[in-house]
Image (cartoon, rainbow, N blue to C red):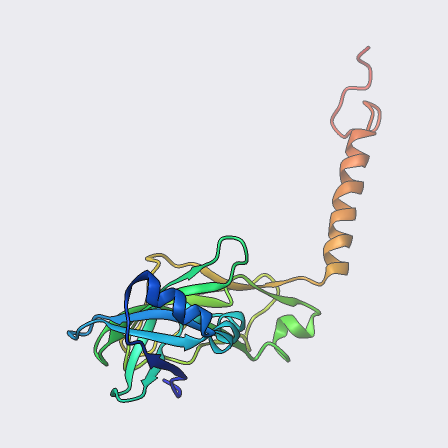
Amino acid sequence: MAGEIPDLVAHARTGTGKGAARQSRRNGMVPGVVYGGGSDPLPIEIPFNDLLKKLRAGRFRATLWNLKVEGQDDVRVIARDVQRDVVKDLPTHLDLMRLKRTSKVNLYIPVEFEGVEGSPGDKQGGVLTVVRPEVELRVTAGDIPDHLTVDCSGMEIGDTVTISDVTMPDGAKPTIDRDFVLANMQPPSGLASQSDDEDEVTETEVINQTADTVEGEDASED
């Protein structure tokens, strides 16, 4: 289940405060602090380009990182805040929280839909519409799943798959306490359009009916 945890390489900062933070930025770094886990806060700095690349890749705050700082033991962390410049929208500071293997944390886990091709709905020209490509789960830091798997091999047109249809990994639980939809099998667009046209024709025919042609209507009334 849990895959390899990606590294986040940082350097220890010797100074603290606004002056030290400004100097760190002038040196092409983003200052930050690591806290929690029963240890003292640790001032750090991360190369600006490295952090920006990870931010642009997405899911930065939803990823468990293996923080590597020279002279320190590796520690698992999760980003709790990334401050940005209000004008340029570039990172200026970040806060990381240490986690133990037994710590519980909320993370967005990707959902993979398998068996769509060749399913009854697919053979009928249906299209799987994904409502939630990822789901927020409460998980244990030492056992984070790579993804959730949804079996769509038996889906027919009109079928819906919800979170209750998914087997949860051990120790994982959705943060939303209801049976929400993950995806549904929609009819082919041509069939849907044809159905809409038929509805419109039927409605027009009813509107154009007269007392002489409506069954059960007394045509003698004036």
Closer to the camera in the image, 188 or 39: 39
Closer to the camera in the image, 39 or 114: 39
Q: Quadrant of the C terminus?
A: top right
| Image vertical order of residue 82 relative to residue 204, above or below | below
| Residue farthest to the left, as pictured | 38
Residue 41, how many percent across, how many down? 22, 71
Locate residue 34: give its quadrant: bottom left
Q: What residue is shown at x 81% (from left), y 22% (from top)?
A: 211
Q: What residue is shown at x 77% (from left), y 59% (from top)?
A: 190
Residue 217, how many percent across, how many down? 75, 23
Residue 128, how many percent across, how many down? 61, 67
Would residue 190 be found to the left or right of residue 127 on screen? Answer: right
Q: What residue is shown at x 37% (from left), y 75% (from top)?
A: 45
Locate residue 166: give its quadrant: bottom left
| Image vertical order of residue 201 relative to residue 33, above or below | above
Closer to the camera in the image, 13 or 167: 13
| Image vertical order of residue 207 relative to residue 146, above or below | above
| Residue farthest to the top, as pictured | 222
Residue 167, how many percent across, how many down? 37, 75
Q: Quadrant of the N terminus?
A: bottom left
Tally of numbered discs: 0
Locate residue 139: give its quadrant: bottom left
Would residue 65 be found to the left or right of residue 73 on screen? Answer: right
Can residue 138 be seen in this snapshot?
Answer: no
Can residue 43 be seen in this snapshot?
Answer: yes
Closer to the camera in the image, 14 or 88: 14
